[in-house]
Image (spheres, grey):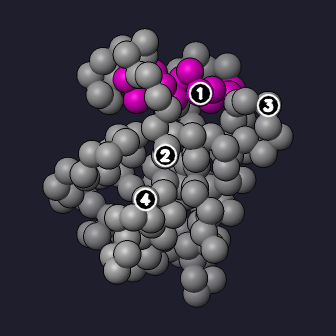
């Protein structure tokens, strides 16, 4: 069963408002997950590093909840003090990646979580996540986070 993925969610859902609580996703851009290319494990790891570096706002080698809230606030066009509740996706991302439970995510934790989830998304185990596998993984993540929104429920 696919866990709620920390940084893989960011990689799988580039067009979605990852940090929005109940907002519907905007229309997919031309380079959406549906049209996106296949991705190798090495590419996923490189993207995880780049994503981690964007989220590590103070460049101390860790991503904290405060940094995640700052990203949410910026995405929403507001300030961190206006974010009164932690969006479920953010909490799930931090909880899943923070394997030593110290309240912050290191680069090693982020890469490990991403590669774990990449391997789970790679259902035929060929080292490549295809657009079809990516869309299936996205659906599992979204259904796990929002089960009432799942089709047939």
Is residue 4 at least partly visible in the picture?
yes
Which residue is painted at 51% across and 63% down in the image?
A: 144
Q: Give the residue pinned by disc 4.
A: 146
Q: Is residue 51 magenta?
A: no
Q: Earlier in the sequence, mark 4 or mark 3?
A: 3
How far apart, in angstroms, are the residues tagged by discs 2 and 1? 12 Å
How far apart, in angstroms, are the residues tagged by discs 1 and 3? 11 Å
Quadrant of res 32:
bottom left
Magenta part, dominant SS = helix
Which residue is painted at 32% across and 30% down in the image?
A: 75
Q: Secondary structure at mark 4?
A: loop
CB contact under 8 Å: marks 1 and 4: no
Image spot of residue 139 (x, y percent): 41, 70
Q: Give the residue pinned by disc 1.
A: 65
CB contact under 8 Å: marks 1 and 3: no
- Magenta residues span 61-73
Q: Earlier in the sequence, mark 2 or mark 1?
A: 1
Q: Give the residue pinned by disc 3.
A: 102
Q: Secondary structure at mark 2?
A: helix
Dot 2, crowdedness within 10 Å: few (<14), some or many (≥20)? many
């Amino acid at each position: 069963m696919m866990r709620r993925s920390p940084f893989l969610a960011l990689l799988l859902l580039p067009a979605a408002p990852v940090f929005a609580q109940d907002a519907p996703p905007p229309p997919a851009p031309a380079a959406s997950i549906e049209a996106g290319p296949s991705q190798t494990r090495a590419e996923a790891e490189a993207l995880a590093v780049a994503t981690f570096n964007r989220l590590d706002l103070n460049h101390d080698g860790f991503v904290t909840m405060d940094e995640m809230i700052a990203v949410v606030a910026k995405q929403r066009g507001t300030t961190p003090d206006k974010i009164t509740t932690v969006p479920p996706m953010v909490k799930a991302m931090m909880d899943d990646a923070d394997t030593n439970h110290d309240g912050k995510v290191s680069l090693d934790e982020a890469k490990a979580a991403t590669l774990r989830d990449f391997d789970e998304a790679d259902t035929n185990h060929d080292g490549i996540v295809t657009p079809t596998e990516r869309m299936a993984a996205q659906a599992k993540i979204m259904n796990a986070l929002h089960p009432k929104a799942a089709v047939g429920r």
